[in-house]
Every structure is written in structure tokens, then in C-alpha cells.
Amino acid sequence: MSFLDASDMVGGYGATNILHGCTLQVEKGQIAVIVGPNGAGKSTAMKAVFGMLNLREGHVKLDGEDITALSPQERVKKGMGFVPQVNNVFPTMSVEENLEMGAFIREDDFTDTMEQVYELFPILRDKRHQNAGELSGGQRQQVAVGRALMTKPKLLMLDEPTAGVSPIVMDELFDRIIEVARTGISILMVEQNARQALEIADRGYVLVQGANKYTDTGAALMADPEVRRTFLGG
Amino acid sequence: MDILNALVAITNYILIPATAYGSQLALGALGVTLIYGILRFSNFAHGDTMAFGTAITIMVTWGLQAMGVSFGPLPTALLALPVGIAATAVLVLATDKLVYSYYRRVRAAPVVIVMVSVGVMFMMNALTRFLIGVDDINFADGARFVITAREFRDMTGLAEPLPIRSSQIITIVMAALIVAALFWFLNRTRTGKSMRAFSDNEDLALLSGINPSRVVAVTWIIAAALATTAGVLYGLDKSFKAFNYFHLLLPIFASAILGGLGNPLGAIAGGFVIAFSEIGVTYAWKKVAGYLLPAFEPDGLLQLLSTEYKFAVSFVILIAVLLFKPTGLFKGKSV
Amino acid sequence: EDVKIGISLGFTGPLESMSPAMAAGAELAMKEVSDSGKFMGGATVTPVRGDSTCADAAAATATVERLVTTEGVKGIVGGMCSGETTASLQNVAMPNGMVMISPSATSPALSSLEDNGLFFRTAPSDARQSEVMTEIIMEHGIKEVAVTYTNNDYGKGLADSFQAAFEAAGGKVTINAAHDDGKSDYAAEVGALASAGGEALVVAGYVDQGGSAITRGAIDSGAFSTFVFPDGMVGDKLQENFGAEVNGSFGQIPSAEGEGKDKFMALAEAAGFNGSDVYAGEAYDAAALILLSMAAAGTTDPGVYKDKVMDIANAPGEPILAGELGKALELIAAGTDIDYIGASSVELIGAGESAGTFREIEIKDGVIETVKYR
Amino acid sequence: MSQHQPKEAWGGQWRAPVLFAIMAALLVFEGLSNGWNGALGIINMGLISAILALGVNVQWGYAGLFNVGVVGFVALGGLAPVLIAMPPTPGAFKAGGLGVLLALAVAIVTLGLAVWINKTQAKRIRLIAIPAALIAGFFAYRALLDPAVAMIEAINPSATGYLGGLGWPTLIAWPVGALMAAAAAWAIGKTALGLRSDYLAIATLGIGEIIVSVLRNEEWLGRGVMNVNGIPRPWPVPYEIDLQNDPGFVERMASFGLDPVTGSTILVKLLYTGLFAVILLALIWASEMALKSPWGRMMRAIRDNEISAAAMGKHVTKRHLQIFILGSAVCGLAGAMMITLDGQMTPSSYNPLRYTFLIWVMVIVGGSGNNWGSVLGGVLIWYLWIKAEAWGPDMMEFVTAQMSEGSLKQHLIDSAAHMRLLTMGLILLLVLRFSPRGLLPEK
Amino acid sequence: MIRVENLHKHFGGFRAVDNASLEIATGSITGLIGPNGAGKSTLFNVIAGVHKPTSGTVTMDGEDITGLAPHELFHKGLLRTFQIAHEFPSMTVRENLMMVPGDQSGESLWNTWFHRSRIAQEEAALLKKADEVLDFLTISHLKDEKAGNLSGGQKKLLELGRTMMVEAKIVFLDEVGAGVNRTLLNTIGDAIVRLNKERGYTFCVIEHDMDFIGRLCDPVIVMAEGKVLAEGSAETIMQNEAVIEAYLGRGLKNKVKAEIDSETARHESHGAQPGLGDEAGHGGAA
Ligand SMILES: Nc1ncnc2c1ncn2[C@@H]1O[C@H](COP(=O)(O)OP(=O)(O)OP(=O)(O)O)[C@@H](O)[C@H]1O
Ligand SMILES: Nc1ncnc2c1ncn2[C@@H]1O[C@H](COP(=O)(O)OP(=O)(O)OP(=O)(O)O)[C@@H](O)[C@H]1O
Ligand SMILES: [Mg+2]
Ligand SMILES: [Mg+2]
């Protein structure tokens, strides 16, 4: 039984379905990466897993427990963390307060975690009293990921965490994600920097028109010339 | 030349009343700004919320007075205030549940919610009048003055009096306390921060595990407390009349905007600017000039503008400020 | 048969607190006529209330339109404020030939309005009051006053005509400053008045509106201690609000000497409202005038009975006080002339407005006392 | 949280015709049950309200300008019939006209000077020179104005006491009202349009209050709170009394089986209806044409995202100004029409609740961005506003009918008038609850 | 040609752009790279008239365009896209494109009332053009969708599509690639090259995908901390130690050793032929 098991999800906005039986599974401590063309429904699938979209069919299980009916904030309490693709910071709160909000549900002392986030993204330490809305695109992205890390989730979901970050930070980020996964946290992420992402992925999903087109290990997908040509830019 | 009398006259007719009025506006504006900042709409029902809270407080005050309870030199209404706040909180929470929550859920445009609040305003307006009628009600008891005009004259021998009413002192003190408490709450406590987070990015607040219904509820409760307190202090200082509370809405909004919407500090500054400009610009300086330059006998009143224009003046100042600081004195939000 | 009479007053809006007692006064007269069983061969009278809002001419017009065309009223007690009254008179009452008797619209402008003989008022025009007030102030030996008025046609009209009369009599008005009713704060006005100074402050406002607030501010800040209260300010509320604080202040209200008023007060008390509220008596009289004129004309057609109003209101004839409407109906039926005096000593002059007897009052030991009638 | 998608409004393309048919049926029912006079009265004010709502919709629905100073523009438009159609006050112009004109000229020169200093001078100079110019100008203005005004107001104060009008036909006053509002909008727009959403809203609210204050307090201009009445009717509307006194008319009515009073009142109202309807239709045509063209598309783009629209070459400020002026002009036009219909100018009646928020309610209930929605909203809300006055007490009677006699019942019956507001609020909430994007949403 | 001289942009005390001077030659596709927060977008915003510079000048073909408003720059042929997509959310995708051209006679109120046939003709032409652009961007199935409902990447495409609606002289692209599928990004790259070659557009491109930069851009300008750090061809830049240090980095540290080895081997065999089989996009530096 996978740690996260979202099977046969069908749903969408309004009357039309975007997801047509999409399945996503992540094992404990592993990294799963979703790739696919724009508009394939990747973000929609992430939202569905997080309960921000009502499913018409299918179910979502976390650690064996069916959470299909839970609200997003209840899922946060169950140990899920999510970085959305857009609007992922609190613009008029300082960087530090953004991170504090990430730790909102934590009762324990979170200064350590914050320290770790600052080490990961040193620029944030310099800017910690600045409002997140005044940061550059890539800096915001770092705040967003940092916020999710503050939750200390059991399952971390990232929607294009590296969009707009510089190569060096991207490397740092992927490094960190591997480290995080090693501590037993499961990672589910959407990436357009697909080749780098699949490299570190234990499992890769290629999503097309709301359904799984290919599912394999990251390396195997990378090796598939058809996948490379059509989805990974050659 | 008689500087002392001139100073006393200025204090008596400008400084003290403007400070008290400014505090009342500030408290009202705080409520408006809070709702705007967190729930993101301009609440036109705020004036009538104030009226409702005050009406309940008055009825409880009557009850207490009938039972012979009093609060020493302080007005009995202060004892009744918590009940008023509680009742108002219940009312606004119920309103939120029945009315506003739906629009939050469907993510209606802010202007739609503003119109909804106009609807709520009509209904609360009627409710208050059903409860307590339309009459002018005076419910201040306790000591009216800290020092009366005559006492002051006798004490100092000055020609000009400087009476100080207890309601003015109570208003200023309460306003200061409440503002300090609110600041501490919003900037230091977890709930306060979660409210700011919610106001910034509602979706992300959810993803951080912040419970939106709690934030909304706390916001309404605080708003109810602010509204009721502002209403009662205003009523103690002047008198209660349901109709006036609707009219209070305009200067309150002006204060909130002038200071910068969503910014509590701004609401306070805005309140004082409006109050001082209303009173200061239309003041007739004849008497003061008479004290300062006894030789100079002015024909006119030395009044910049007649008092009919006091409201207009405060709006002119508002617009002038906005031209230089487009989101208010303290950098407010805009949806 | 059932005769409907409209009552168009500002039940919501700036003067909403004055309307209930006025409506009650008018309804009291109608009930009295109905109960007497002597009206038009036993017809009953039903009041129909309409909200004129006082401020909104269009809404008032629509309200009166409804009263006339939908409800089919045969006469209207109202409107309340002069502006709204003019609008509904010109837009509805005149085209439809409907009689309107206003208990409270006092603007001098209404005197000269063309009305086809359809409009009357039981309240005196402000021009008259100004003269009376000037006399009283002069008799108190006061030569310099500050004036504040409620910023509407009533207040402005009264203040202006008072200033003219007072200055003509050799007095000086140091400032003539408006205050808006329903505003949140009057410190600016009080400051300006205080600075201008004067021996007394004339408050041409409403007692449950800005008028009280200004008075309060002036007392509290020690700016004035003597006040002059015209009609809008004199009432129980004044006593209640200020009591002994305004000892020595004085004023006047249109009000009749003697029995009529007393009787009305008693009737009002029995009916559960306060007969001394501003214009309650005038409203009673307005309704009574309509009904008695109908009886005299023998028809409810406004086009016909409008010509009887002046006859009923004025001498010669048997004097009729408040509470004697039954008797009046009997007399009319018997063909005897009557002179309606009612609750407010009705005496219509000129184009059908109250000549205005005024009661001079003074506050002594916190109580309003009548000095004399003028 | 749930992702909410606005549901497709029921009825599709039939929705508008059906809703308009229902509205028409309501009015016909009103006419049949309560008499055509009342119904036509509602229709007339309803049409004016529709025009007003259209003006606000042009600003809000097209361009997202949050103007809550509507009352100011309506009032300004309302001044036009006074200035144009009233007879001049004899002697007034000679007494003080020149002084007033001079004072106004001084005011304009002063403002121009201030703007010029602001544009051309260094910051240091500006800081001193602008206030100095303004203060000097203000005193000069007062020095010229005050005596002139005193002279004018002294002329027969209880009946005139103002400059009076030009004595021209009332119809001319309508476009003039629109022009006056447009001129004010231009000045306001030049200064305030840089403001964002709610800040602009409160600024315009303030400006509305300022305009109304001026009208209330400058007696020489329009008698202030003393009101101007007897504004002549526009061509071709006659006076009922004249009709009733015209034997030919009485005869013709008799041949229709109508009594002259009913006939004349209805005829007058119908003529107004015709006038208003023609203007409304012309405005709708113009707005629909504009909205359904690249101009409308550009406006929607600006409304959606100003920064991006500017980057795509659209002159946002200029367009905002254009639309602010147009919308305000429409409000001014409606204001002039309203005063003509009332036959009198009552400055104290211009309160924001009635002339700003009620109009906004019309726009939002109708469906912002949709011209037909504004028309529907305008007529419907006015109908409800008027009917609530009667329904409120009826409802209260119904509620209290079952109650036993007692002070509570009495209290409730006495408070019946407040049911008007309650009913209005309730209806507003219900409409917004069941079609939150308005009855006829923008597609 | 755009020339930026001694440009400063300060936010409060913070120097987002700090004395930057650079040139974008006519007909080039200039790349602009640099760490997050280097001031790239701020520089764009200053050039595009969104921000007023604290000091310094911007000239376009010798003409001073410092501080001109965005809409004026548009009419001079200077277009830009936004890093965070700025679509018109309540308008359809097609309308988003059709609103772009600046000289539409239907934008005058007068014409909307009195010259309807002229407008209709223009509209037909615009419609055709918009559909071509949509086809090109592979999103023609979305033409009647509200732009607000597009996915993150689709919005980026739309953003680019708008610049294709008019004859531009110079186009500033702020991270068109972020969030765009790499296969599609290659197509976009082709389109940029084609616009550059065939229509003579000048481009200035901010991008973090070094594949893309390497394939398209010459020269490449590197910014860091508000200053210009280096400038040169893509290859030389990718070898530049300072640039690697500040921006490119040296790849993943945490990966299984063996994999890294095989990666490196492959890179070497490919040499400096970016875009094909290049696992780590910026691998040229590894
Ligand atoms: N409004 C602002 N107020 C204060 N600081 C700002 C503001 N806008 C940008 N900055 C700061 O200026 C710096 C440059 O930002 P800019 O957006 O230009 O970076 P960038 O080079 O585009 O980075 P990225 O690659 O992440 O998009 C950042 O450090 C940012 O924090
Ligand atoms: N709020 C919405 N309402 C309606 N349709 C939507 C909404 N959001 C997304 N869609 C549609 O759903 C489809 C899938 O969108 P989604 O955001 O899941 O794509 P994605 O795979 O994340 O793409 P990208 O890589 O570009 O982010 C798209 O065609 C988009 O147009
Ligand atoms: Mg996505
Ligand atoms: Mg950037």
C-alpha cells in the first residue's frame, strides 16, 4: 500500500472534467514527479489530491486512511504540505512571518526548521523583514517552498517549485528535496524542468489530458525516446 | 494681550472636542478597516452595527438602573457594555452565517459583497428601530463633568472656561486602551497573525492549516466589540439616535481611507485628521484674535469657511492627502 | 360607507422621530369622528399612512400618488417638510384636485405657492414667529444674539426672517450659522457660535435633532447660558434633556391658549401618546378640518369641500375645541356655523395658513412654564 | 475551500426577454390593480433610474471605476433646469451678477495658477508658492463674492433671493445638465482618477458631498435649502389643470369614457414616459454599439488589468477620463430629467443613500457590465423601493394579525414604517443570493 | 538599438539596479541571465516604463525614452511580457489577442457609432490573425475559453502570443519558459528565431533555462546584485568562473555518485551542442 494513493480521480471545474481517471501514488520516503504538456491537468490533479477540488470519482488515501472527504486544512493536519503553482506567498507579510505561517499548525518550537530554511535559501535570511510581495520572482518561489518545509509534512506536494529559480538554486532545491525524502518524507511534485526532476525521481508520471499516459521509474521514462521527444523537449 | 485666555479658548473649542470626536471616529474606523483588511469589503452596515450594539447596551443599562445598580461616578452603560458586545457579536456572526459566508464561498467580487452589506444595513437599520424606536435617547449617567465651566472659572479666574466632561476622558482613555490591545493582538499573537495571513492570501492560509471559519469568526467578534464600544462611547458623549449612526458612517469611512484601508494605525490617524480638520478649519477666530490683539477689533468672524462646509472641508483634505499618498497616510491595501 | 384619509409624513428619514406622535394625533381625530357615528350618515373614517421620507421628493410624490390613486383617499394630512410637500402638492394633489393640509410645513414660500385652493396648513408661517420672537427677546432686554438654525427650508427661513426682524428692531445677530441634522458631531458649530458670542443663543432647530446637540455643547462648554427656543425646540424632550440647566431661557410655540390644548393633551394621554409633542396637535387639527369640511359640504369630493375649509376654521360660529368633533358634526348637521379652534387655536388667514397664536414660555426650575399668549 | 465556478445562468438567451416580460407584467398588474397613474409614475422614475444605472454601469461595468459620488453629478445635473428654465430674478443680475462672475473668474484663475506652478516650478518653490497662491486667491474670491451674494440674496428672500435662470425652454436644460456634470467630471477625473478602487470610491463620495454642500448652501445660485419650485415643464408636456380647463380635451376624454382628471394625469405621465423612453433607448443603442466594438473590448481589458493594458499600448488614464466623463454626463442628464419631472429642486434631498447607493444596488442587481441589466435593475429596484413602502406595513399587519392585543403588538404596528427598509434589505439580499452576478450577468 | 546608461533603481535604500549599462543591438536576440533578485525584471520594468529610474537613461535608436509611459513605448514598437502572467482574465483567449493592435479604428467611440462597416472589416482581419497565432501556439482549442481559466503554462503562451499580434521592433520576454513544457519551449524558441530572422524583431530574453539561452541567444548579459557581471557569447559565459559561482552552480551534490559519473561522461561526448540530450539543462558547465 502506497503512502499516498490517489486513484482513478475524475473531476474538474464547473461541468467539464479535466481529470479523466488519473492515478498518483507515492511510497514513503520516495519522490514522484509528474510531467506533461501545459494544460494537461497536472495542477488540477495536485489540487484534487489536496482537496481543493471536488472529485466526481476516485478516492484519495493517505497512509491507508481514506481522506477523500476531508477539507484542505484537515489534510494539513494529517501531514500534507502543498506549494501551489501561483499565489504561493503572503504578499504583505514579511518573509519571516510567511515562514511562521507555514508552521502555524505546529505546537513545538520551530526555530530549528526556520534556521534550516535560511541555510537552504540564504537570500531569505537577508530579506527576512521585507514583505514577500516585494521580492523577485525567484525569491518568492523560495519563500513558498520554505513555507511548506516549515510544516514538517509527511507528504510534501510541490507544483513547479523551480519555475523561475536560477540554476544554482534549482540544484540546491533538488538536493534538498532528496535530503528531505531521505528523512522519510514523501514528495509529489510537478515539474517542467522535467529532465532534472526525473533524474531524482523514484517514480515518474506523464500526464496527458487528465489521464496517466506513462508511468515508470524516473530513469526509465528518461530513457524512453518517445517520452523524451514529446514531453521532455528532445 | 491675553495668551492664557486665547489658549484656553482654543483648547476648549478645538483641542478637547476634536480629540474626543477623533477617538470616536478612530474606533469606528478601526472596525471598518479590520473588516476591509481581513474580509476584504467595505462594510456599509458598520454604522448600523454600532447602532444595534448601542441599543442593546442601553436596554441593559435601563435594566441595571432599574435594579439600582450603578458604577459610581462612571456611566452605568460601561457595565452593560459587555452584554451589548456579546449580543452584537451574536448578531454579526449570525449575519455572517446566513448572508456573507455564501459570497465568500462563491468568491463574489468585492463590490457585490459591498452591495450585500447595503442590504444588511437596511435590515439592521430596521431591527434597531424595532428594538428601541427612533427617538433621541440620553443614557449617560454618573458624573457628567470632571470639571465644569464654572468651577474652572472660579479656580483660575480666567474669563474663558475649560470644562472637561467625563465622557470625553472616558472616550480618549478607552480608545487608547483598545487600540493598544488590538495592535498587540494583530502583530504579536498567533491568531492575530493568522488573520493577517488570511487577509493576504486566503487559499494559502488554508494550505497552512489556518481555519478560515475561525478567522472570520474572530474578525466579526472583534468588529462587533469595536462597533459597540465606539457606538456606546459616542452615545455617552452625545446621545443615541438610530438615524445619526448611519450618518456617522461617512466620516468613519473617510477616516479609514485617509489612514489607509486595512491599516489600524491609519484608521486612528485618519480619525484625528478628519476631526481636527472639521473643527479647526471652520473655527471662528474672532474671540482668540480678540484676546491676542486687543487693539484689533475684527468686524467679521475671522472664519475661513462657514460651518456648513465642515464636512466638505474634511473631504477636501481627504482628497488632497490621497493625491499625494494614493493609498492613504499609512499605505493601505486595495483590493 | 368608509372614507379614507391619507397621512403622508416622514416615517423614515431625518424627522422620523417626530412622525409617530403626529400620525397618532391625526388618527385620533379620525377615530373620534368615526366613533361619533354622526359623520356623513354614519360613515367610518380610515386612516392610511404613507411614508413621505421628508427628504426625498420623488418618493414623497410616489407615496402621495399611491394614496390618491390606489387607496382612493379623499384628503391628505401632510406632508411634513416643506420641500417634499411642495413636490407632492404640485405633482399629485393639484393634478388630481386633492386637498392637502399640512400640520408642519412652515416655510414662508408655501404661502405664495399657486395651489388652486387645495393646500392649507395648521402651522403658522415662520415669518410670523420671527416677529413674536423678536418682541420676546427685546422684552428680555437682550440686544445681541447668536443664531443657529437647522439647515433646511424651515430653519433657514425662520433664521433669515428672524434676523431681518431682529435687526429692524435694533438688535444685532452676531452669527447666523447653520447646523445639519443627523450629523455626528457639532463641536465645530459650537466653537463658531461661542467665538461670535452674544447674550443668548437662538436655536432654530429640532429638539430631538441637532438642536439639542448644539444646546448641549453650548451649555457644556460654557459658551452660552441663556437660550431662545422657537417651536421646534419646545417640548417635553427639552425639559427632559436639559431641565434646570437652561433655567432662565425662554421661547415660544404656536399654541392656543387654554382649553383646546388641554383637552387635546388629555385625549392624547388616553390614546397613549404625548400630546405636547411638536405638531401633534396641528396634525389633529388638520385631520379634523378635512372631516368637518366634508361634513359641511355634504360630500367627500375634495373639489367641493375645499371651499368649506376656511369657513369651518374661522369665525363666526360656535367655537369647537379638541374632543368636540361629535358636537361639531351635530351642529353642522343642524346647519349651525362653527368656528373650529381645536388643539392649536386654528385660525386660517391669507392663502389658508394658520394665523398663529404663540405661547411664550420660560424655563423655571427645570420646567417649561407658560408666561403668556401672544 | 472549494473552487467555485459561476454556474451558467438559467434560461440562456431567453433569460433577458423573460425577465423583462416579468417586469412588464408586474407593472401592468400594478396598473390594473392600483390604477395607471401610480404605475406610470413608477415607470417614469424607473426610466430615469435606468438611465442613472446605465451611467454608473458605463463607469463600473465597462471600466471598473468605482464612483460613489453619483449623487453629486445628479445634483449638478439637477441645477441645470433651474439655471436654464427658471425666469430670471429681476434686478438680481444687476445687483450682484458681475461680482459673482468676477469671483468665479478669480477662483478659476487661482486654480489655474496653482496647477501651472505645480507643473513648471521647482519643488522648493512649489511648496511655498502653491499655498500662497491658493490662500491669496481664496481671500480675493471671498472679498468679491460675499458682498455680491448679500445683494442677490436680499432681493425678496422668501420667494427668490437668487440669480434665477435664463427663462429658456426646459428641454435645453437636459443636455446642459449633462455638460455640467461632464465638466465637473473632467476636473475631478484630472485629479482623482489615479486612485485605486476603494480610494477612488471614497474620493468620489467626498466630491459628491462637496457638490451637494455647495448646492445646499449657496443660496444665490439655486436658493440652497429653500428649494426652487415651479420649474416649467418641457415641451410637449402640458399642465393637467390647463387640460382640465380645455373643453376640447374634456370632450375627447369623455369620448374615451374617461373623466378629465384621470385623462389629464395619465396623458401627462405618458408624455413623460415617451420622452424618457426615447432618451433611454438612444443611450442604450449608443452603449451597446460601443460595448460590442473594439472600444468595449479595450475597456474590458483595462478593467481586467491596467498594467497589462498599458503595456499593450492602451492609454489607460485617458480612457478612464473619457469613460468617467461619459458616465457622469449620463448621470447629470438623468439628474436634470428628474428635477424636470419633480418640477422642483430640493438640494437637501440629495443624500447618498438614495442617489448613490440605491443606484449602485440597481446596477449590481441588474448585472454589472450589462446594459440591459442596468435597465432592468433600474426599473425593478425603483418599483420595489416604492412598493416596499406599502408592502412593509401590510406585512406587519399580516404578522401581527395572529397576535393577541398588547404592548408588543402595538409596538410592532407603530414600527410598521420601518418595514420599508427591512423589506428593501430582504429583497436585495434575496436577489443577490440567488443571482450573485446580477439578474442579467455580463456574458 | 536600446542603450541603457548608468541606470539606477532604488527601492528605499535597496539598490535593485545599481549602475547598469548595457546595449541591446538591433536584430540580436540578447539573453539576460543572473541569480534571483539580480535586478533583471526591475531593469525590464524600468525600460518598459513601469518604474521610473532613480537615475540614468534609456535610449532607443538614439532617442531618449527614459520614463516614457508603457503605452507610449508600445507605439514606438517596444513590447514586453510579464514574468507573472498578466492576462485579461475575464476576456476570452482570442479577445486577449485581438485587443493588442494599437491603431484600431474601432477604439474611437465616434467610429463605433458611425463607421461600423469599417470596424467590421478590420475585425475580420484581426480575427484571422489571432487564430493564426493561436494555431501556432497550439492552443487554438482554447480560443473561446476565459483567459483566467488557463493553466499556468498556457497563460505564458498567451503572453507571448500577444507580442505576435503586431509588428514590434523589440520585444522583451521575461521568463517565457518558466512553467512551459520543454517540447513546447523548443517550438517557442524556433518561433523567436523565425520572428528575428524573417521579421527583424529584436529580442531581449530573461530565462533561467540555459538550454534555451544557449540555443537562442547571442550575446548573453549576466547581471548580479544590480550590476552587469559579464557579457559575451553563450559558450564563453557558461565557462565563466564568476558566473558559475554566482549563478550556474555545479550540479547536484546529493545524487548517487555513479549517476553523476555517467552524466558527466555523456556531457563530454556531446560537447557544446546544447539542446540535444542535455540532461541537466545547464550541463554545459558541469
Ligand atoms: N517593490 C519593491 N520594493 C523593494 N524591493 C524590491 C521591490 N521590487 C523588487 N525588489 C528587490 O529588488 C531585487 C531585484 O528584483 P528583480 O525582480 O528585478 O529580480 P530578478 O533579477 O528579476 O530575479 P528573478 O530571477 O528571481 O525574477 C530583489 O532583491 C527584490 O527583493
Ligand atoms: N479555474 C479554472 N476554471 C476552468 N478551467 C480551468 C481552471 N483552471 C484550469 N482550467 C483548465 O484545466 C486544464 C488543466 O489545467 P491545469 O492548471 O491543471 O494544467 P497544468 O497541467 O497544470 O498545466 P501547466 O503546466 O501549464 O501549469 C486547462 O485546460 C485549463 O484551461
Ligand atoms: Mg500547472
Ligand atoms: Mg524576475
Image (cartoon, rainbow, N blue to C red):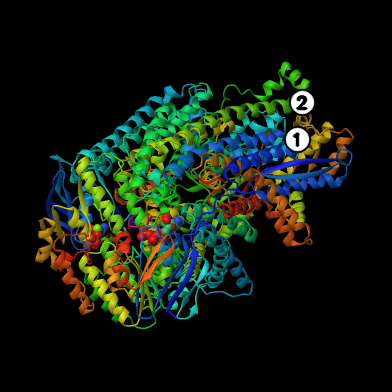
| Position above or below: A41 against D377 | below
Q: In which quadrant of the rendered view does residue D379 lie?
A: top right
Mark 2 vs ligand 2: CB under 8 Å?
no
Tell us which disc is closer to us: 1 or 2: 2
The subunit letter for the residue under badge 1 reads C
Q: Verify CB contact (< 8 Å) between mark 1 and mark 2.
A: no
Q: Position of residue D353 (x, y in %)?
A: 53, 47
The subunit letter for the residue under badge 2 reads D
Ligand 1 position by quadrant? bottom left
Mark 1 vs ligand 2: CB under 8 Å?
no
| Position above or below: E42 against E197 | below
Is residue B285 in view from this perspective? no
Q: Position of residue C250 (x, y in %)?
A: 58, 49
Is residue D337 in view from this perspective? yes
Q: How many marks?
A: 2
Q: Which residue is mark 1?
A: C313
Q: In the displayed structure, does residue E25 sit left or right of residue B135? A: left
Q: Which residue is mark 2?
A: D258
Q: Alpha carbon of mark 1 to alpha carbon of mark 2: how far? A: 35 Å
